[in-house]
Image: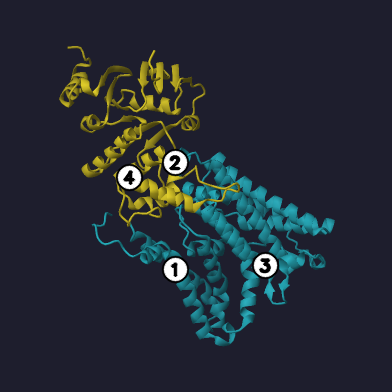
């Protein structure tokens, strides 16, 4: 038995939509303080898998264990209570609202009458900006509106928000999609901050080069099954790219 | 979008930037009253005209403050004048039957809140766009008044015998209309809820980005239903203020208030796209809309100019906000 219990265990997870089998017998363990990249072609089932973890979809068969607890009746609300938080690019931020309203959206600091403690929310927001996001510029404050931020910064706000609320497992769906090179670098730095905070993350990204720098482990999905599962030390970036190419062209990883 | 690194702007400039809509509308109001005062000092440097303003503004003003929440959601309500009409009829009829001001008030407010609930359910649960749903309920409630009242008014002079009448249509120190005090108090309360309460924060978030609000665990449907309910409540309350002031109910009560009320909200800088607005802006919008007609006549133009100048003011102010907001992006 492991001294350290895995954070998340998926046991024989299968999912069908009608007659379409999207996922087949997925067995996956995510440890604490681990950044796992989920890679694979379009239609491999990556999004379905993270939606099952988030509680958006229910698996047709299989079990979900989180922190040693068998999770039944999974829902988005429940997963957030458990400490699983999803970060969707931009979609989870309100553009015209200030940073302090965004960070605390739905989880405001209030008194017994529901009155906001604006001072505390601003103070915590400024602290997050400084400590987690490295914003030192005075042009950026808790009062800044989200629309004045760049794409990478928005991603950072969403991640900082998840970390602030003590998520242990952060799920990122295409965190670098549509970002410029410089902004991508920023977003990836925010993902690395998740490890520095000793939390775990699962992220989907199409770009192997982004994935390789940040992730500890690569799980390759192919047509609904796990085709391969590598630790970073097991292979170089070139080898990972070769494996992906081989899978795409021959449909198999066997030599 | 990304300004090159330069010296940080001084803080007061950021403050001006943040409150530019509120500042603009305050300037517009000041200019307007300056024109009135220069145009007819005899009228505008005396208290009488202001007393008249203060007695009439609350009738649509309370609804404008309340409608700010619905507009901030990115929704609209066209039915509140009809709700005012129907709940006033309920108020008058109950009073005639029971002679109890308090009971009539309670029943009237319940009916108004219920009408708001219906709107909220149609929009949030059934999923009808609010402009369509409230066109339906607009005709529905007005139709009910017509059917119930059969075109006849109700004389309610005996309302004055109730001590509560002096709360709704009294004159404090014989000079200050109590309904204006109510307007100010309601503005303060709603302003507080809008910007400093969790509910207001949720309204802003839902209006800005409904999907993200859902993801953040905000109960979007409930927030929408509450917003429509409070507008129904305040429409009924406005009906009581109006009925008490004129001590008469007539079946077209509330008619003609729709566009002036919404104009006050839009002049106040609340965005029709949702997610942005202030109660302060709406309050100043009420002062502008509520004084325009009398002001125009007092400075020597005829009543024929009123609509034109309404239109001019609304178009100019809304364009101004659009330009001001674009410059920040």
Residue A61 in percent (x, y) is at 44, 15
> Pointer 2: what residue?
B211
Q: Are marks 4 and 1 in contact (CB under 8 Å)?
A: no
> Pointer 4: what residue?
A133
Q: Horizontal placement of B142 versus B34: left or right?
A: right
**How far apart are labels 4 and 1 at the CA level?**
33 Å
Image quadrant occupied by the N terminus of chain A:
top left
Q: Residues within 10 Å of mark 2 (few under 14, many from 20)?
A: some
Local secondary structure at mark 4: loop
Is residue A2 or residue B59 the one in the foreground? A2
> Pointer 3: what residue?
B179
Residue B219 in percent (x, y) is at 53, 40
Furthest-right residue in view?
B98
Image quadrant occupied by the C terminus of chain A:
top left
Question: Which residue sits at x=47%, y=33%?
Answer: A80
> Pointer 1: what residue?
B23
The picture's colour for chain B is cyan
Label 1 is found on which chain of the structure?
B
Answer yes or no: is residue B108 visible. yes
């Amino acid at each position: 038995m492991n001294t350290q219990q895995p954070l998340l265990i998926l046991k024989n997870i299968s999912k069908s939509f009608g007659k379409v089998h999207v996922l087949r017998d997925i067995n996956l363990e995510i440890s604490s303080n681990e950044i796992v990249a989920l890679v694979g072609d379009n239609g491999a089932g990556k999004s379905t898998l993270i939606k099952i973890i988030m509680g958006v979809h229910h698996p047709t068969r299989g079990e979900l264990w989180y922190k040693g607890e068998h999770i039944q009746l999974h829902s988005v609300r429940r997963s957030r209570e458990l400490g699983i938080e999803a970060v969707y690019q931009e979609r989870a931020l309100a553009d015209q609202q200030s940073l302090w309203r965004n960070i605390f959206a739905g989880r405001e600091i209030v008194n017994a009458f529901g009155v906001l403690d604006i001072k505390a929310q601003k103070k915590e927001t400024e602290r997050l900006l400084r400590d987690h996001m490295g914003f030192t510029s005075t042009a950026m404050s808790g009062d800044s509106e989200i629309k004045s931020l760049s794409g990478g910064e928005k991603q950072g706000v969403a991640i900082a928000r998840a970390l602030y609320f003590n998520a242990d497992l952060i799920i990122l769906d295409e965190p670098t999609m549509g970002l410029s090179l410089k902004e991508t670098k920023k977003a990836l730095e925010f993902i690395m901050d998740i490890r520095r905070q000793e939390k775990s993350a699962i992220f989907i990204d199409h770009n192997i080069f982004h994935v390789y720098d940040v992730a500890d482990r690569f799980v390759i999905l192919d047509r609904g099954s796990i085709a391969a599962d590598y630790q970073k030390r097991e292979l170089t970036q070139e080898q990972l790219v070769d494996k992906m190419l081989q899978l795409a062209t021959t449909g198999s990883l066997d030599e | 979008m990304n300004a090159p690194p330069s010296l940080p702007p001084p803080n007061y400039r950021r403050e001006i930037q943040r409150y530019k809509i509120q500042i603009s509308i305050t300037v517009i109001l000041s200019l307007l009253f300056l024109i009135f005062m220069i145009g007819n000092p005899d009228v505008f440097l005396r208290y009488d005209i202001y007393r008249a303003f203060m007695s009439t503004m609350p009738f649509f003003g309370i609804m404008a403050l309340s409608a700010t929440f619905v507009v901030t959601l990115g929704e609209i309500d066209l039915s509140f004048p009809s709700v005012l009409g129907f709940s006033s009829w309920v108020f008058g009829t109950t009073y005639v039957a029971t002679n109890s001001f308090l009971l009539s008030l309670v029943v009237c407010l319940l009916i108004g809140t219920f009408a708001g609930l219906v709107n909220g359910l149609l929009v949030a649960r059934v999923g009808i766009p609010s402009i369509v749903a409230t066109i339906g309920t607009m005709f529905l409630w007005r139709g009910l008044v017509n059917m119930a009242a059969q075109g006849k008014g109700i004389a309610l002079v005996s309302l004055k015998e109730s001590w509560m009448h002096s709360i709704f249509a009294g004159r404090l120190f014989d000079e200050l209309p109590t309904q204006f005090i109510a307007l100010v108090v309601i503005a303060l309360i709603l302003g507080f809820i809008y910007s400093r309460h969790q509910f207001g924060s949720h309204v802003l978030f839902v209006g800005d980005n409904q999907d993200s609000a859902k993801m953040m665990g905000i109960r979007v449907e409930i927030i929408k239903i509450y917003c429509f309910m409070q507008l129904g409540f305040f429409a009924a309350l406005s009906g009581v203020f109006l009925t008490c002031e004129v001590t008469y109910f007539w079946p077209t009560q509330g008619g003609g208030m729709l566009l002036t009320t919404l104009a006050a909200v839009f002049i106040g800088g609340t965005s029709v796209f949702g997610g942005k607005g202030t109660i302060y802006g709406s309050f100043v919008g009420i002062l502008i809309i509520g004084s325009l007609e009398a002001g125009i006549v007092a400075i020597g133009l005829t009543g024929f100019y009123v609509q034109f100048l309404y239109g001019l003011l609304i178009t100019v102010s809304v364009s101004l906000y659009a330009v001001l907001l674009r410059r920040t992006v």
